[in-house]
Amino acid sequence: MSKLGSSSSSNKPYYSGNVIINGQKVASNYKKGNSVYSSYNMNDNEKALYDYLGQTLALNVPNVNVFSDDVRQQLQDQIGAYTNQGVNLINSMYTPMLNSLKTDIANRFGNFDNSVFMDNLSGIESKRADSMSSLAQDILAKQNELVNDELSKRYDYLDFASGLQNQIDSRILDYLGLAAQNSSMGNAYSNASRSASGSGFNTSALLSNLVKNAINTANPASGTGLSILGSLFK
C-alpha cells in the first residue's frame, strides 16, 4: 500500500506570528517544545509606566482609608482654622453688643446690679450660645467634608491608575491576539498546502491530463468532447 501523504504531526512546522510597528517587534506568538507562548515586548517607557501603576495600586489600595499622622494633622489644622474663623465672627458680633450694653447701663444706673442689665445680658448671651451651638454643628460638618474630600481624591486617583492599567492590559491582549491570528493563518496555510501535496499527485498536472484525455477520446461530430470537458468544470 502506498504511504504517500502520510506524515507525523510532530514533523509539522509551527509558524510563529509577529506584530511589528515602526520596525519594532511588539508582540509574538511561537512554539517552544510542547508549549506555545505569546509575548509582548514593552519599551522602556511602557515598562516604567506599567511598573509605576502596579506599585501605586499595591501600596495604596490596602491603605486607602488609613490616614497618616501628617494627613490627620493637615485636616486638624484646617478644622482649627475654620473654628477660629467662626469664633472670631461670633465675637465680632456679640462683643460690641455687650460693651454697648455695659456702657448704657453704667451711664443710666451707675452699676450693673439691676434687672435691666441682667435681662439684656441674658438675651445677648442666649443668642451667642445659639450661635456657638450652630458653629459646633458647622465644624462637625466641615470635618466630615474634609475627610470625604480626601477619600474622594484617593479613590479618584486609584480609579484613574486602575483604568489606565486596564487600558494597557487590553492593548497588550489585542496585540497578542493579532500575533496569534497571524500564527494561525500561517499554520492554516501550511496545513492546506501539505494536504494538497501529501496526496502524492500534482493537482495542476492531473487537471491538465484529464482535459487532454477528454479531447483525445471525444467524437467531435457528436459533441461528446465538449460534454466531457464541460463536466470537468462543474
Image (spheres, helix red, strand yellow):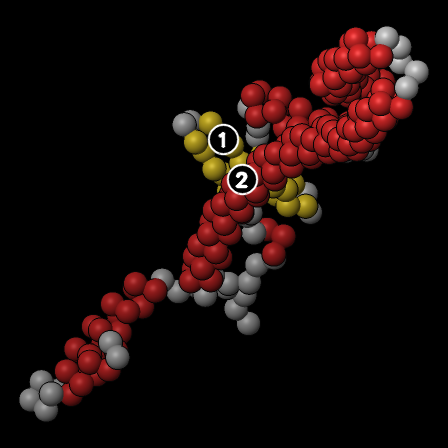
Residue at 49% x, 45% y is 178
Residue 80, given in percent of the width and then of the height, sits at 79, 17
* Mark 1 and mark 2: Cα distance apart in space: 15 Å
Secondary structure state at the residue bearing disc 2: helix
Q: Residue furthest bottom?
A: 222
Between residues 230 and 52, which one lies in front from this camera angle? 52
Residue at 56% x, 38% y is 167
> Which of the two labelled residues, at mark 1 and mark 2, occupies the earlier sequence position?
1
**Residue 171: which disc?**
2
Quarter of the picture containing the N terminus is bottom right
Residue 101 falls in which quadrant of the image? top right
Q: Amino acid at mark 1?
A: Lys
Between residues 188 and 10, which one lies in front from this camera angle? 188
Residue 148, given in percent of the width and then of the height, sits at 73, 33
**Residue 25: which disc?**
1
Q: Amino acid at mark 2?
A: Arg
Query: How busy is the neighbourhood of tag 1: few (under 14 within 10 Å), some, or many (20 plus)?
Result: few
Does residue 2 appear anywhere in the picture?
yes
Disc 1 + disc 2, Cβ < 8 Å: no
Answer with left or right where residue 133 lies relative to residue 30.
Answer: right
**Residue 211: which disc?**
none
Residue at 61% x, 57% y is 8
Q: Is residue 50 above or below residue 95?
A: below
Residue 154, given in percent of the width and then of the height, sits at 70, 30
Secondary structure state at the residue bearing disc 1: strand
